[in-house]
Every structure is written in C-alpha cells, then in structure tokens.
Amino acid sequence: MFYQYEAPADSPEVLWQRKALEEGRGRAHGAEFKPLFRVQRGDFSSHGVSQTAPNPRLRRRHHLLSQMEFAITLLLMHLGALDLREQYRLSLYDDDDEFTSECSFHPGTVSLAKILGIRHPAVNSTEPRLQSTDFVVQDRHGFQRAIFVRPWKDLPLQGSRQMQLLDLQNLYWQVRDVPFHMLTDRDVDPKLIEVLIWAYAGYLETDGQISDDFIGFIADRNGHDPLLRALAGWPAGAGDAVTQFKAAVFGGRINVGLHFKKLPNLNAPWHFSAHVPNHVYRHRLSAFFGMKEARHV
C-alpha cells in the first residue's frame, strides 16, 4: 500500500506513466535521451515557466520546466558538460542500471522509501509514482553528478513531505556513488546568466561551431585594437564577427574579463536532512544489503 489517493486504472496519469516506461523516457544518453517530463500538453510536469533549449553539441532540445532550470542548463553547457540529462527517471524497483556500485544490484525508490521510513508517492494503491531528478550531468572530466534545482524561496522546509522526497533522491544517488547537489538562485551570479543568455543566441546561430580562425583573429588583435574595431576587421563582416564572438564566449573560448561573484560549487554534495539520523540510514541499509556496513551512506 502506497498512498490513500486512488486513481482509476485507466486514468490519464496511469496511462501516461505506463507509456513513459514503454518509451524508455528518462534514460539513454546524448541525442537518444528523452526526458521523463516534456514541455507539451498532457505531460505531468511541475509548475513554472516551461521552455525548450536547443543543445547543438548533443543534437537535441532540453525540456525545461522553469526559468531556474533554463539558467542552470546554460551554465552547465558553458562549463562544458559532455552529457546533460534533464528530468532523469529514477528506478522504482531494484535493478541493474547504468551506475556502478559495490552491490550486486541497486535498490529502487520503493525499497529506499522503506529504508527511510516514509511512504512512496503513488498514483493508486498498486502503482507507485515515478520519481525524477532535475539533472544528471557528465562533466568535462567524465564524472557523473545529480543536481536538484530550486529557487531559494521554494526550498522544502525541514520535516516537510517535500524534504522527505528530497532525502529519497539523495539516498538513491548515494547508494550509486553519484554526488547529489542542490543548486539555487543564490549559487549563481545573475550577471553571469545575463551574459550567457546574450551569448547563447550566437552559439545557436553557429550551430555550436566555434571558428578557430576567429579565435586566432581575436588573439592577434588582443591588447592592440579596441574590441569593436577588431570585430569590424573580421573578413566576413562585423555582423558575423559579433555572432562568432558570442559563440566563443558561450563556449568558453574567449574570456570577456568579467569577474563573477559566484559559480556553483559542484565539489560539495548536499547532505541528508535531519529527518532520520545518519546512523539510522547506515543501519537500515546494512540490513537491506545484508552487509555489516553500508559504505555509500
């Protein structure tokens, strides 16, 4: 038994969830990835300003459910993410997924909810509701990271149901040895986002291609000509020069000399709330795995 809410077996949400599983949404990599929630009618997405954002490197569009997710997507693209998967679907049941661990299998969210002593969200008494993480990112060094994104004012309160579900996500990634991060608008300088939105237009216009000739052209004139005069000297014309300049800024090939107050700290994973003491997590996981110690918690 999961929850008191009882949805009919043929309700839109039940049918949508089954279709999402059949289509393999929320899994795969690169251009083949399809997010669990998409920006279109009929999907059960979160509230906020939804939009899509093309990613020339991955040859697909990101489906983003809020302005905050859009800002973080641009930032992660700028930082050189090799893969960027939004609305990543978490496994409901214990299975062998793409993430490695010392365990022979990985517990799904249903088992982990029992370990935490919380009830799992469900669409009815027999079908648990699919859970997702906002972003799973492969950084430029090849490491995987899971990221939860919310505006500071919308963060879950200690002891709330939302905090329980955040703990569930955290535990899911910890047993898979994947760092779990929380990012808010306080972690990102708004001036940086303004620059990235401006530069993103040029990045799209060049289809993500940054001209080495243009980089060399700018490097030869750096410190000698004012920027506008240097751009005017680009053989393809000033208009193309501005586009190339934007693309190079977005791709991190040109440092525009701005010193931003903040960049997200992806070296400090988020920790559990005080919902359950940490030693209780270890004890319950040890019992679940049949080990003396749950080393990943």
Image: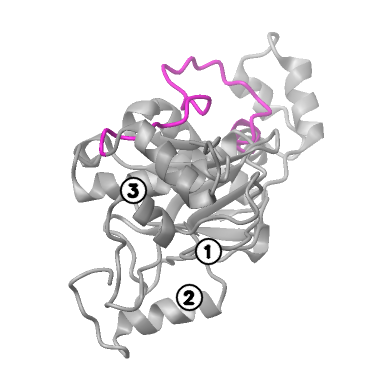
- For marks 1 and 2 on the same chain, the one whose residue lies earlier in the sequence: 2
Q: Which mark is residue 20?
A: 2
Rendered image: mark on residue 116: 3
Q: Disc 2 or 3, which lies upstream in sequence?
A: 2
Q: In this view, does 111 lie above or below 208?
A: below
Q: Distance between the residues labelled 1 and 2?
A: 8 Å
Left or right placement of residue 65 versus residue 174 in this view = left
In the image shown, does 48 or 5 lie closer to the viewer? 5
Q: What element carries label 1?
A: loop
Crowd band around label 3 with a 10 angstrom C-alpha radius: few (<14), some (14–19), many (20+): many
**Residue 192 sits in which quadrant?**
top left
The residue identified by callout 1 is 26
Q: Is residue 37 above or below residue 185?
A: below
Q: State how far apart marks 3 and 1 are (Cα).
A: 24 Å
Q: Closer to the N terminus: mark 3 or mark 1? A: 1
Q: Where is residue 296 in the image (x, y as percent from the top left)?
A: 54, 37
User: Is most of the magenta stretch helix, strand or loop?
Assistant: loop
Is residue 71 in view? no
| Local SS, label 3 | helix
- Considering depth in this image, is 84 or 77 the residue closer to the camera? 84
At horizontal 45% and vertical 40% (from top left) the residue drawn is: 72
- Kind of element beneath mark 2: helix
Is mark 1 in CB contact (under 8 Å) with mark 2? yes
Asked if residue 233 is among those painted magenta in the image, a careful observer would answer no
Percent position of residue 96, x then y? 63, 60
Q: Which residue is drawn at 50% across and 17% down?
A: 258
Q: Which of 113 and 259 is in front in this view?
A: 113
Q: Give the range drawn in magenta.
A: 246-275
